[in-house]
Image (cartoon, coloured by chain):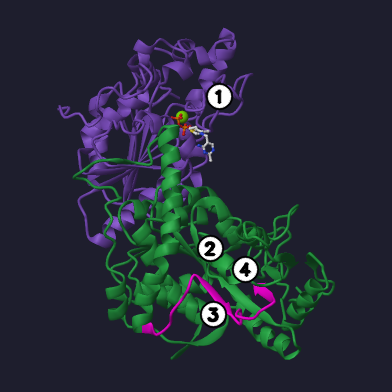
Amino acid sequence: MIPKDELLHPGHPACPGCGAALSMRLALKALGKRVMMVIPASCWSIIAGAHPFFSLGVPLLHVPFLSAAAAAAGVRAALEARGEEDVTVVAWAGDGGTYDIGFQGFSGAAERGTDMIYVCYDNEAYMNTGGQRSSATPVGTFTGTTPKGKREGKKDLLSVIVAHGASYVATATIAYPQDMIEKLRKAKQKKGFRFVHLLSPCPTGWGYPEDRTVTMARMAVESGAYPLLEWEEGGWHVTQRPSFSVSVEEYLEAQGRFKGWEREELKGLARRVLLQWHRLRDLEGMPR
Amino acid sequence: MHLMLGSEAMAFGVKLCRPQVIAAYPITPQTHIVECLADMVEGGKLTPCRFVTVESELSSISVALGASGAGARVFTATSSQGLALMHEILHWVAGMRLPVVLANANRALGGPWILYMDQTDSLSQRDTGWIQVYCASVQEALDMVPLAYRVAENHLLPVMVVMDGFWISHTMEPVSVPSQGDIDAFLPPRSDRLFMDLSDPQALGAPTSSTTFYAIKREIQDEMEGVLRGFLDYAKEYASFSGRLYRIVEAWHMDDAEVALVGLGGIIGTARYTCSILRSRGIRAGVVFPRFFRPFPVEGMRDALRNVKVVVAMNRAFSPGVGGQLTQEIKWALYSLDSPPRVVDWMAGLGGVDPTPEAIEEAVVRALQGEDVIWMENPVGPQR
Ligand SMILES: Cc1ncc(C[n+]2csc(CCOP(=O)(O)OP(=O)(O)O)c2C)c(N)n1
Ligand SMILES: [Mg+2]
């Protein structure tokens, strides 16, 4: 069951069709009210509202771009010193704030096993500044700083964070709300450093009509470009098998950020997108 | 009385204030402060307190930001490269009005690599909105910490407690330690409501309009002035149990002085010693110590310096292309006097160059001969 309570209020200033806003809406349904949220520079510093408006129903600390994980660790330390136990501390950061500028603090907090949920809502570029490459941007993407298409592939952050000894790691996306809510609930019940990666399509940055955000997320999953996974002590497993009813090329072709590639080139890109999950290829139902 | 290093005295001062969260990263010459505190926390002598062993100063100050934003009394410490690394978040902490206390053991900044003391690190953070209070002795390294928390929490501004690296941090002096009961009475638990609260969800640090931002900055300026007005009351209360009264501007031999030596921190002890030598040679010298560099005590400095002919600013940092920051501040404070004294810009020691009594004497003689900018011809200091 998806809870009816809304902790993301209507009237927030996200762009129409914003995947990151939907991500938050669902995440808070799963996490509930006893949450303390830390958000670094990102689209979400805007979506949470400009003073005196505030779109969230939980307390929020805005922090500089690189500070999310460490500031959340500080919130946790303060709660521990005061003996307050039943609060979920959440760092909520974009891909830039996680994969790039915030990477050091992210690694530090994970290595220390800091008791928090770190959510990376990944729209695969620096969208707040108009769409420039991050290390989470897929190969071939045209962005403001990759005018000839990004040459490098997406950083494999999931393996990195598992290697840190995180207590729970999952990928999820808004097209599968049930799956996403279950994962966040599970994350909430665990202790230690938990990492949830949310693919959050962005109509302006990705170049698709704003009513197709959920469709994009679904195509990403069904094509195998974004596997829905979970990592617990026992290892990885797939929570939702791709149907392969669409191909990765079709998923890429549906987006303006890959316009300009020839069919053959797109095929190559698609292969590389799938290859980024090569370490997980042995998983049941995953493309080979 | 206990014989202690400056770093230990600082750590004792911190312990007496019962911080709930400490986050710090080691750097010479600050390391002993945090090692001492880690021992206290792990040994159960400082509790309840969380010591977060971060991976960098970017994170120690970010942890401080988060913990203070969640309502805790927070301490961090650093020096030199570490303080410079924190710069962005220092601005954020001050703009958010979070009462964090940070100890900085002064050290020069590279390149080239340099371990020795000067004040480039702290003076480079002049405009971040942090209060800066300087310590001139090991005793002050302890006493300034409770005073710093009192100021920080009463005025909701972060405070940097600054001591000389090595010359104070690594120097032993006899120290009198106040009782825990006295400090508890002097410094009750943090009582502001400026933090995350589940029963009243608010956003802290949200984007704002230009006009609100302008108003916030103006409030910070008003509050800084409030610190200058309020400090003597806190200091008197502190003196009531410690017997040591600290003033915002300290002055020695200034009643009849014709030349004033002005400096920050440990150099004040050397200047006071040199002052008596100068007086024995017929030069009527005095010494002035603005304990606070931010807020800069403009009125206090005017009062202290209005009757001298020459002020020698003993700079232990400078802004390339202009000169000593301390010189600039003093000139700015004195400009509106009818006949302000001549202010001499002496580069008294950079990167560990030692402003010895002889060096001070020479600077005074050169200043009285009419030089306005003084660089030493034969600076002395550690040779590697
Ligand atoms: C130190 C620093 N550098 C650069 C910026 C400018 N900046 C603000 S948000 C942002 C990109 C954020 O990207 P991401 O984390 O992916 O979040 P998104 O905007 O895509 O939601 C950048 C570059 C900043 N605020 N601070
Ligand atoms: Mg992004």
Callout 3: CB less than 8 Å from ligand 1? no
Callout 1: CB less than 8 Å from ligand 2? no
Residue drawn 36% across the image and 48% down it: A72
Indicate the secondary structure of the residue bearing disc 3: loop
The residue tagged 4 is B306
Quarter of the figure with residue A68: top left
Between the C-alphas of marks 2 and 3, the distance is: 25 Å
Between the C-alphas of marks 1 and 3, the distance is: 59 Å
First in residue order: circle 2 vs circle 3: 3
The residue tagged 2 is B299
**Residue mark closest to the camera, 1 vs 3:** 3
Between the C-alphas of marks 1 and 4, the distance is: 68 Å
Q: Is residue B304 magenta?
A: no
- Could you tell me residue A114's position as x and y percent? 35, 53
The residue tagged 3 is B137
Report the chain holding disc 2. B
